[in-house]
Amino acid sequence: MAEALSTTSSSRASWRGMRNSFLIGVAFRNGHRAHALKILYVDYAGGIIGQSVRDAYEAMRGPTFPTLEQASPDA
């Protein structure tokens, strides 16, 4: 049983690494297309995490960065 568990854990770790590589590979030199992506989020709590998301977006905002749109939790 422990052998199967370690194999599964190893497979998950391997998949995480592959997934990260895939996402980086997909985004490589695609800034000219990324700007068309719109990301919608809702800050239900209205706390520090939502503020951090907005602050990070403002720091990275630019012509080749996706658009971040905040929706009201009441909508």
Image (cartoon, grey):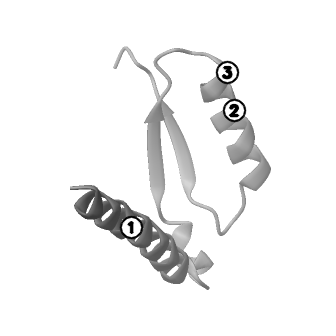
In this picture, residue 24 sits left or right of residue 16: right
Q: Camera-side residue: 14 or 55?
A: 14
Say if 24 sits above or below 44 in the image: below
Query: Which residue bears the numbered disc 3?
Result: 48
Q: In which quarter of the image is the C terminus?
A: top left
Q: In which quarter of the image is residue 11?
A: bottom left
C-alpha gap between disc 2 and disc 1 = 33 Å
Q: In the rendered image, which residue does mark 2 sit on?
A: 52
Residue 32 location, x and y as percent? 59, 79
Local SS, label 2: helix
Q: Do the residues labelled 2 and 3 touch (CB within 8 Å)?
A: yes
Q: Which of marks 2 and 1 is nearer the N terminus?
A: 1
Q: Which amino acid does label 1 sit on?
A: Ser
- Tell me where residue 48 sits by quadrant: top right
Q: Which of 1 and 32 is in front in this view?
A: 1
Report the Cα–Cα distance between label 3 and label 1. 35 Å
Residue 56 % position (x, y): 72, 43
Query: Would you name the residue on which mark 1 appears?
Result: 10
